Image: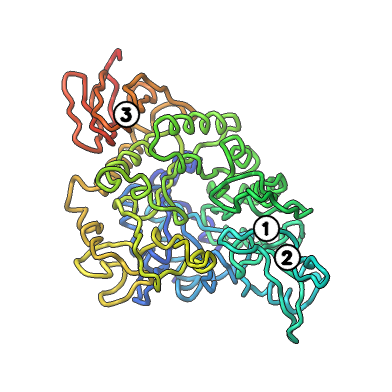
Amino acid sequence: MPQSPMSQALRVPEEGPGARADWWRDAAIYQIYVRSFADSDGDGDGDLRGVRQRLPELAALGVDAVWLTPFYVSPLADGGYDVADYRDVDPRFGTLEDFDAMLGAAHGLGLRVIIDVVPNHTSSEHRWFAEAVAAGPGSPERARYIFRPGKGADGERPPNNWRSIFGGPAWTRLKRPDGTPDEWYLHLFAPEQPDLDWTNPEVRAEFEDVLRFWLDRGVDGFRIDVAHGMVKDPALPDIDDDAKPDLLDGSTRLPYFDQDGVHGIYRDWRRIVDAYPGERALVAEAWVEDSERVARYVRPDELHQAFNFEYLGAGWDPQEVARVVDATLEANGRVGAPTTWVLSNHDVTRHRTRFGGPEGGLKRARAAAMLTLALPGSAYLYQGEELGLPEVTDLPEEALQDPTWERSGRTERGRDGCRVPLPWEGDRAPYGFGPDGSEPWLPVPPEWAGLSREAQHADPGSVLALYTEALRLRRGVVAESPGEYGLEWEPAARGVLRFRRGERFACAVNMSGAPAELDGIGEVLLTGGDVEHRDGAAVLPPDTAVWFVPQAGA
């Protein structure tokens, strides 16, 4: 029988790094896209029982925590980020009892659990929105959302020129039951995702209660979706003609992103989280323009972490990577917050494909993983990157479900290519994602049979073996290296990044197209390729990384 929510709330991981105070400052956190992780019942969708069954393999990988994408009641107009009920599990993903059992299993394995909260918008099937539509203009029910009359003699034009992140206008006009036109409502994303009005005290109180609901069940923290978007300029001004309405653009010139009012919300949330035992944490998905702006979200009385999208966007460019690393460590150091590092997630092209280069980007992906896990702070891993999965770029058009596909007039394929279900074992589809013979919600490429977890377990040179060993070393020699906010760059050949953290750990990454000679190399701890090492020197092939102990006196 599942434990009661209150008994769950008092449980923390029983062993492992997740059991200690401030665990989030240098944790390795694994993102689970629930629908694509593991399907326990063969209906094609991953679910919470599937997550529970596979948790031991994540513990063996060596991560400290997992982050689950939304599993709430939802029509899945945007992959679950359109929430119809924030306090229950969608039946396709399981039940609240399944969630409690999964949470207890994770804690028993020493794993923390972070869940998504989606506060910018609800689903259009949320009870509140149905009440707003029925109540009419000027009602308290409509005041929970951003409704406005239109422009023009008959209100036929939207209130402003804002565009949806998914394409098309950011406003949709309602119709009354008799067919006559009504007000317009704002949706920065799909029309099925109406934006909430965070100037409304009822909205604030509702989400504070949602946080407490899940904190009482025992969750260890929240990842805040579109954390920079909840507050809009009250004047709702038009945007410049050249402004790009893109979540990934990170522009603070937009009047609906990175407004100062969001910070008061997070100060309130921080007080709520700090009142619970067990070191709960808050992390922001804040696509803002630079490290200085991101650091404002992680000041001591606000959030614990914010995703480092500048790092994700730096590409395979040693100068740009070094600039972002320095700027991030400096900005976060000034506010006393740890830095996060992330290469991929459910919204972007997988980094193996994004980096390109020889061998389809695999060598660069291996080297980038070693670089990321060598840096001071916390690392987020997206499911499947530890298998070296590429983006699936040839999904059949009839399989595409991301709203961007239709909203763009079928010109942009959207994000389904990074959300294809994981291959676990076996030599035929669905490769252990679900029972034999079941059909996953997105087709799994046949060539992924060779990338399955089972296949890679048998290969000491696999990407899985590299991640497992890197995470093991990270818990020891890397984590024990001094300096949470800094590292020491060392001279190296052109196109090579080389740094040390204290006397016992250093990392070098060759981002050039030619082999590079390194000196001062003591014990080699880990390599991402064929590194020649002898007599205190090494030759590092292109697109390759090495972890080592610096030679004494070097």
Q: Position of residue 371 (x, y in %)?
A: 36, 36
Compare residues 205 and 526 and report the one nearer the observer.
Answer: 526
Q: Amino acid at mark 2?
A: Pro
Determine the image quadrant of residue 479.
Answer: top left
> Does residue 353 appear in the picture of this structure?
yes
**Residue at numbered disc 1:** 162
Of pointers 1 and 3, the one earlier in the residue sequence? 1
Please give left or right for residue 524 compared with residue 323 in the image: left
Secondary structure under badge 2? loop
Secondary structure under badge 1? loop
**Residue at numbered disc 2:** 158
Q: Quadrant of the C terminus?
A: top left
Please give left or right for residue 490 compared with residue 359 in the image: right
Q: Position of residue 466 (x, y in %)?
A: 26, 43
Q: Amino acid at mark 1?
A: Trp
Single out the mark in the foreground, 1 or 3.
Answer: 1
Q: Are marks 2 and 1 in contact (CB under 8 Å)?
A: yes
Residue at 28% x, 74% y: name it: 435
- Which dot marks residue 508? 3
